[in-house]
C-alpha cells in the first residue's frame, strides 16, 4: 500500500482505534455487570470526540497531527497505566479518587503522584507524533504539521482533560452508586480525548483571530 493510500486510511480509522484502546483501558478495571454500561458510555463519548476532532480538522490531509498525537498518546497512556497498576491496584486508586478533594488541581496532583508512568507514557507518545507526522507529510503546511509548542499545549490539555473526566465520572458515579475502576478509567480516557478537542478548537480559533488582529493593528 502506497503512502498516499496509507494516510487517508489511517485518518479514517483513528476513531475506531481510539475506541478499541478506550475499551482495553476499561477492561483493566472491569469487575461487575454495571461496568458494561460504563464502557458503552465511554464508547459514545470517544466516538463524539472523534467526530468533533474530524470536524475541526480538514479530512483531506489524511492522518492529522492531533489524531496522531491522540492515538500515540493513548497507546502510551495504556502502557504506562499497566505499569502503574502493579504498584497501585486500580480498586484502591478508584477509592482514593472517590475520597479526594473534588477540585481540578488536587485531582491533577493525585494523578501525577499515583500514576506517573501513565502520564509519562502519554506525553512520550504525544511527542512521538512530531517525527511521525513530518515523515508522512514532509511538505505539510505550517498549521497542519505538529510542532513542539503545539505538542506541549495539546499534551497539557489532554492531561487536564483526564483529571476533569475523572471528576465528572466520580460525580455521576456518586449519583448512581455505580463507582468502579472501570468508570474512573472511562472518565480518564474520555477526558483525554475531549482535552485534545478543546486544544484543537482553541488552536483553530487562534488562527482565525490572529489575521483580524494583525489587520486591526495596521
Image (cartoon, rainbow, N blue to C red):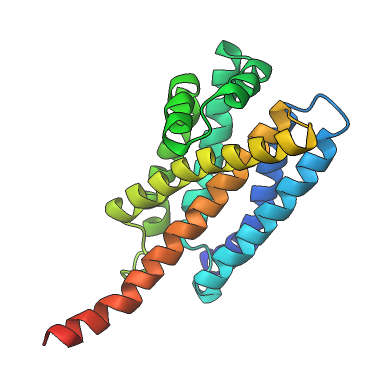
Give the residue at x 73% y 29%: 179
Furthest-right residue in this view: 33
Q: If the image is split into quadrants, where does the N terminus sit?
A: bottom right
Q: If the image is split into quadrants, where does the C terminus sit?
A: bottom left
Give the residue at x 62% y 26%: 98
Q: Position of residue 175 (x, y in %)?
A: 74, 38
User: In the depicted view, which residue is nearer to us: 84 or 135?
Assistant: 84
Rendered image quadrant of residue 186: top right
Rendered image quadrant of residue 11: bottom right
* Any part of residue 25 in sight: no
User: In the depicted view, which residue is nearer to us: 172 or 12?
Assistant: 172
Q: Position of residue 116 (x, y in %)?
A: 45, 24
Q: Position of residue 196 (x, y in %)?
A: 49, 54
Q: Position of residue 145 (x, y in %)?
A: 36, 63
Furthest-top residue in this view: 87
Give the residue at x 32% y 74%: 207
Amino acid at each position: 500500500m502506497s503512502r498516499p493510500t496509507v494516510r487517508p486510511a489511517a485518518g479514517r480509522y483513528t476513531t475506531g482505534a481510539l475506541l478499541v484502546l478506550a475499551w482495553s483501558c476499561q477492561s483493566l478495571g472491569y469487575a461487575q455487570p454495571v461496568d458494561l454500561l460504563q464502557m458503552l458510555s465511554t464508547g459514545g463519548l470517544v466516538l463524539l470526540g472523534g467526530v468533533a476532532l474530524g470536524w475541526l480538522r480538514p479530512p483531506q490531509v489524511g492522518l492529522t497531527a492531533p489524531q496522531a498525537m491522540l492515538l500515540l498518546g493513548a497507546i502510551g497512556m495504556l502502557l504506562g497505566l499497566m505499569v502503574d497498576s502493579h504498584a497501585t491496584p486500580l480498586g484502591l486508586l478508584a477509592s482514593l479518587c472517590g475520597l479526594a478533594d473534588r477540585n481540578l488541581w488536587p485531582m491533577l496532583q493525585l494523578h501525577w503522584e499515583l500514576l506517573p508512568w501513565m502520564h509519562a507514557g502519554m506525553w512520550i507518545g504525544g511527542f512521538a507524533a512530531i517525527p511521525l507526522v513530518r515523515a508522512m507529510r514532509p511538505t505539510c503546511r505550517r498549521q497542519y504539521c505538529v510542532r513542539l509548542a503545539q505538542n506541549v499545549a495539546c499534551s497539557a490539555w489532554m492531561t487536564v482533560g483526564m483529571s476533569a473526566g475523572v471528576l465528572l465520572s466520580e460525580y455521576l458515579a456518586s449519583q448512581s452508586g455505580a463507582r468502579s475502576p472501570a468508570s474512573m478509567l472511562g472518565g480518564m480516557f474520555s477526558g483525554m480525548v475531549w482535552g485534545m478537542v478543546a486544544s484543537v478548537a482553541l488552536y483553530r480559533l487562534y488562527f482565525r483571530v490572529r489575521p483580524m488582529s494583525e489587520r486591526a493593528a495596521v
